[in-house]
Image (tube, coloured by chain):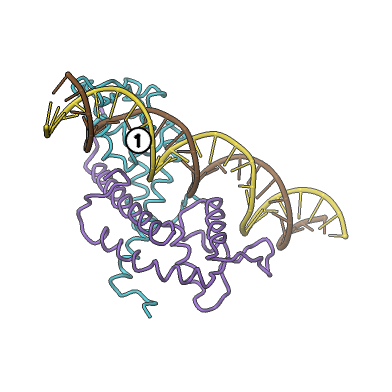
Chain colours: A purple, B cyan, C yellow, D brown
Amino acid sequence: MAELDSPAEAGLVAQWRDLLARHAQTACLLDRELGEKHGLGMSEFEVLERLVEGCDGTGHGLRVQELAPTVHLSQSALSRLIGRLEKAGLVTRAMCTDDRRGIKVALTEDGHRRYTEARPLHREVLSLTLADDPVAPCGPITD
Amino acid sequence: MAELDSPAEAGLVAQWRDLLARHAQTACLLDRELGEKHGLGMSEFEVLERLVEGCDGTGHGLRVQELAPTVHLSQSALSRLIGRLEKAGLVTRAMCTDDRRGIKVALTEDGHRRYTEARPLHREVLSLTLADDPVAPCGPITD
DNA sequence: AGAGACTACATGCACATGCATCCAATGCAA
DNA sequence: TTGCATTGGATGCATGTGCATGTAGTCTCT
């Protein structure tokens, strides 16, 4: 019949559903809050954060490839995301001197400031949605 | 300065990044595999599964609202998802007799078969990506 | 040096999603 | 019953995403 899952499979499915629920809840709230109050999407924030971590102080910037592992997006989506950040004046794109195919992405002052302003809210959302076990409200849905 | 996270915050961030990575990995592989081999997206599969669970045997069907909590999608996205499933002949949409605003969504035989065919692959992907702690390859990216 | 394979990033296109809105049906109040 | 707010679901629209492809720069081999 195979109409039913083995206990092991049932466990996996439960684990997956919990993961999905947590992810949806957190990502949705994060996107909404960061978007409304700071004009940033979730992934935009992650990229800014990576840039702050990767080249704090120095203005070196990171290659697009170095940003890729941070956000779980396709290469094309990342390219456009950086385009959006650039258009918003939060990062600059510059040609790599050592490999002229590559692009160095660097935070601007505005970018750094925007990140700093947004971070507390980001942390707050995480503490709200991840800390407690229950996975209750706030689908990306109506609510 | 607030340039650094408190230990508690750092823990949350780490937890969130791990969640993001697992989600991206699993969702990506699930979408790719189910899509290629069964013509189903991840959420399509979840809806079929909910329908199987919710009205196995009986042909009653579930209201759209009852499906909503299953997939973490907006109401409009769910409506279109059901539209796709209907167009594919996997479900039927029928007016609710007791509340004529509502729509009863019911599995067709094809839908039930398609789900049954896809389920082993679904479980296999979960066991591949969720079982082990490391979160290694397969971004939605190049790889 | 020159040809071809490969890499880094950008872009055209199709499509799924969310938001706002719309329409029909229901519930409630007067 | 009529009028109005509310609910269930569908749809127009703008946007973000992935895939396939394009373009420019680099590497390798001869």
- Residue A51's spot in the image, x, y percent? 50, 68
Report the amino acid beneath label 1. Answer: Leu
Badge 1 crowding class, 10 Å Cα cut-off, few under 14, some 14 to 19, many 20 or more, is many
Q: Is residue B84 visible?
A: no
- Between A59 and B35, the residue placed more toward the observer is A59
Picture residue at 35% right of the left edge, 64% below the top:
A122
Label 1 lies in what chain? B
Quadrant in which residue C2 is drawn:
bottom right
The image quadrant where one finds the C terminus of chain A is top left
Who's the residue at 49% across and 76% down the image?
A: A56
| Left/right of residue B138 with respect to residue B131 in the rendered view | right
Above or below: residue B34 compared with residue A80: above
Task: Kindly tell me whether residue A96 is visible in this rendering.
Answer: yes
Q: Which residue is mark 1?
A: B78
Instruction: Between residue D30 and residue B17, name the one nearer to us.
Output: B17
Most foreground residue, C22 or A83: C22
- Residue farthest to the bottom, as pictured: B1
Q: Position of residue D9 (x, y in %)?
A: 31, 29
A26 left or right, relative to A100: left
Q: Quadrant of the N terminus of chain A?
A: top left
Residue B68 at x, y percent in the picture: 28, 37
Quick check: A83 above or below B30?
below
**Residue B3 placement (x, y as % from top left):** 39, 77
Which type of secondary structure does the marked residue at label 1 adopt?
helix
